[in-house]
Image: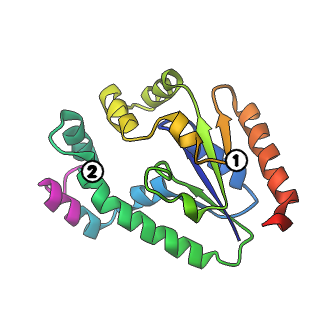
Amino acid sequence: MIKIGITGSLASGKTTASKIISSGKGPLFSADLVVKKLYKLDKFKQIISRKFNINKNSNIKRIIKDKIISGEKSIKALEKILHPLVRREMKSFIKKNKHKKFLFFEIPLLIESKLVENFNLILFIKARKKVRLKRFRSRGGNVKLFKILNNKQLSDAKKAQFCDHVIVNEKNLKILKKKLTDIFKKYERNISGY
């Protein structure tokens, strides 16, 4: 089994890149998708509502974002709850797919969470801050929230040191797809080396 980690800075195009590279090659684990599902669970809503002093029947995700933007609550408090749950789901995903040749993992804070040693190959999707902010805003994101989340991440230069490949994603999908396909083909050919 070869585990491929896909990471990158906020709004760099990790999700798109992950879907492209994993398509038809193996199952994809998405940390963001796990978090999205957690917010729909009653048990999780109860934990969060108690920790952040929110009515569990309200729009918890929106209220937490507002609290983080206003500086009322630290993002660290949220991460302390989320990260262990995401890791548990990741372990379950690996166990469930242990007979697959390739497993793909889209993890925004892969390097910051010290998960590097869990992967055979790590791809870093990169884009300039100006490009990423524009993408983030086009999805309805708040500039202040972008700054807070972006500051949680290591710089591109530091992240790149831990990655096998750095893919710049500032042009179009066709170029991104070609870059990813070329990288994957190389590893597919050299699979006997693992």
Position of the C terminus by quadrant: bottom right
Relative to 190, residue 1 above or below:
below
Q: Is residue 117 magenta?
A: no
Which of the 4 image quarters holds residue 165?
A: top right
For mark 2, give the secondary structure.
helix
Residue that appears at 55% across and 71% down: 93
For mark 1, give the secondary structure.
helix
Relative to 13, residue 46 above or below:
below
Question: Can residue 56 be seen in the rendering of this structure?
Answer: no
Q: Specify the label residue 20 is tagged with.
A: 1
| Front position among marks 1 and 2 | 2
Q: Amino acid at mark 2?
A: Lys
Q: Specify the label residue 8 is tagged with.
A: none
* Residues rendered magenta in the picture: 46-59
Q: Amino acid at mark 1?
A: Ile
Residue that appears at 16% across and 54% down: 52
- Label 1 environment density (alpha carbons within 10 Å; few <14, some 14–19, many ≥20): some
Position of the N terminus by quadrant: bottom right
The location of residue 18, given as percent across then percent down, is: 63, 49
Which of the 4 image quarters holds residue 25?
A: bottom right
Q: Which residue is mark 2?
A: 76
